Image (spheres, rainbow, N blue to C red):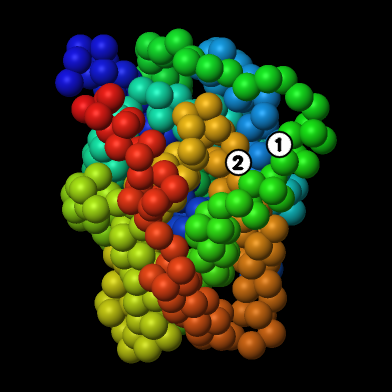
């Protein structure tokens, strides 16, 4: 590894790790649902938390990808706008300290709005950030890069989970949530500083600037040509439905076993341990055997989590679902974006494939958690876990039967081998 590559790996790794620690301290699976429940949110609003965040992460990417491909340098664009990914956490801290008590409804509106802002900006920047990763990190090292960055983030999140448990136990709500959001803000600032130290290589080629309408009109033909990508996106759609149960694990456990608020910190700890253990294995697995296998592993963890959620007789047994959620998150973090870089037939097209792989998931990723909330209100949490389990089974079946790993597929293997030989 050259000094230049080591520098960029360290800077990008620190950027990613601090950002993920910040998200862990304000976890959409544990802390945010608990804060929303404290504010009096019904189940449909609790379900709206992952829906709003997923809509923000997913929807804008394709609309920004054409502009991204035409930029000779991506880093200045990222640094200019990523500030707005981070400011909302400071606003959430102020909301918890000063608004949640006297005006819980307003606080709930601000919570959803700030989550949409931070994830929406992130969605716009996703093609540029992943294109930067694709040009800085060799294809056979990206799995380990994301795995070890996630491992560092998980270690920080593990320590943070004890802090969350202590804060929620020692500080009265809603100020306790404000302290957690304040720590998340500090992590976001450190992430930005690390990102600013990245040395971006010059782009080999940039796309011609075209109108958004002309750019989007190309997408149906692209999907028609690349049937492997189309099958993969179909599997991802079912995988999104399969993961909706995770948004209700915490609320269900708190209600079913009358657990104290500090138990949220325990759940976060279990989830973080699952991520840490999985990252050790999955990064190596992705680099040696491809991202398809890692994604299937994550889906199996999702299926197992939903089955245990349906059958767990005690709170202790139920804790396993958070470990499995951590495995699922590790697999998705390592591979779902990385595999899209490998679907792209040329480096200049990477932003388009990132955009397709995220934006096309937005409608179902937004609607599924909201539908799950309505299902929980109309029937039960068990109904949600059951539907999620069935969707996970379908996703696994499609991934195994119809999707080929793009690294080894006939259409792209020669290109990927050339990239591997050039960068290793």
Other residues around mark 2 within 10 Å, as few (<14) / some (14–19) / many (≥20): many
Looking at the picture, does residue 398 appear above or below residue 422?
below
Q: Position of residue 162 (x, y in %)?
A: 28, 49
Residue drawn at point x = 28 percent, y = 24 percent: 422
Which secondary structure lies at badge 2? helix
Residue 348 lies left or right of residue 312; in this view the side is: right
Q: Which residue is mark 1?
A: 63
Up-down relation of residue 284 to residue 371 (above or below): above
Q: Secondary structure at mark 1?
A: helix
Pointers 1 and 2 in contact (CB under 8 A)?
Answer: yes
Picture disc at residue 322: none
Instruction: Read off the residue under disc 2.
Output: 355
List x then y, in percent, for residue 281. 19, 53
Give percent across and percent down for residue 81.
Answer: 61, 21
| Count of numbered marks | 2
Q: Give whichever of 392, 103 is nearer the camera.
A: 392
Q: Is residue 52 visible?
A: no
Q: Earlier in the sequence, mark 1 or mark 2?
A: 1
Residue 265 in the image: state x and y as whole percent. 35, 56
- The picture quadrant where one finds residue 51 is bottom right
On screen, residue 94 above or below 24: above
Classed neighbour count for the residue bearing mark 1: other residues with Cα under 10 Å, few (<14), some (14–19), many (≥20): many
* Quarter of the image where the C terminus is located: top left
Where is 353 relative to 420, above or below? below
Q: Residue at x 27, y 77 (%)?
A: 316
Could you give the CA–CA distance between mark 1 and mark 2, rounded to whole angstroms?
7 Å
Name the residue rendered at 53%, 63% in the picture: 231
């Amino acid at each position: 590894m050259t000094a230049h590559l080591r520098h960029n790996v360290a800077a990008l790794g620190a950027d990613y790790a601090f950002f993920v620690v910040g998200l862990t301290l304000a976890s959409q699976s544990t802390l945010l649902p608990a804060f929303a429940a404290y504010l009096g949110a019904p189940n449909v609003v609790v379900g709206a938390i992952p829906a709003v965040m997923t809509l923000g992460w997913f929807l804008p990417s394709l609309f920004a990808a054409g502009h991204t491909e035409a930029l000779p340098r991506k880093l200045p664009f990222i640094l200019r706008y990523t500030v707005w990914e981070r400011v909302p956490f400071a606003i959430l801290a102020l909301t918890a300290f000063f608004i949640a008590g006297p005006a819980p409804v307003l606080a709930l509106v601000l919570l959803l709005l700030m989550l949409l802002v931070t994830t929406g900006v992130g969605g716009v920047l996703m093609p540029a950030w992943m294109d930067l990763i694709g040009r800085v990190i060799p294809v056979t090292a990206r799995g380990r890069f994301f795995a070890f960055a996630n491992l560092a983030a998980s270690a920080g999140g593990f320590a943070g989970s004890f802090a969350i448990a202590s804060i929620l136990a020692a500080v009265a709500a809603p100020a306790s949530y404000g302290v957690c959001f304040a720590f998340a803000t500090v992590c976001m600032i450190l992430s930005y500083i690390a990102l600013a130290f990245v040395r971006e290589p010059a782009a080999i080629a940039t796309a011609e600037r075209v109108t958004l309408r002309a750019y989007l009109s190309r997408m149906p033909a692209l999907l028609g040509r690349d049937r492997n990508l189309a099958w993969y996106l179909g599997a991802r759609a079912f995988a999104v439905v399969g993961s909706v149960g995770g948004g209700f694990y915490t609320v269900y456990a708190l209600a079913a076993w009358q657990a104290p608020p500090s138990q949220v910190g325990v759940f976060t700890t279990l989830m973080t341990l699952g991520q840490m253990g999985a990252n050790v294995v999955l990064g190596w697995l992705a680099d040696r055997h491809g991202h398809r296998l890692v994604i299937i592993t994550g889906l199996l963890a999702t299926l197992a989590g939903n089955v245990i959620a349906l059958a767990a007789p005690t709170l202790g047994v139920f804790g396993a679902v958070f470990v499995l959620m951590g495995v699922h998150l590790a697999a998705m973090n390592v591979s779902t974006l990385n595999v899209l870089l490998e679907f792209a037939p040329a480096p200049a097209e990477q932003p388009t494939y990132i955009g397709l792989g995220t934006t096309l998931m937005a409608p179902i990723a937004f609607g599924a958690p909201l539908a799950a909330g309505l299902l929980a209100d109309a029937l039960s949490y068990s109904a949600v876990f059951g539907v999620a389990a069935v969707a996970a089974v379908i996703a696994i079946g499609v991934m195994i039967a119809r999707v080929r790993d793009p690294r080894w597929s006939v259409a792209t293997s020669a290109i990927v081998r050339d990239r591997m030989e050039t960068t290793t």
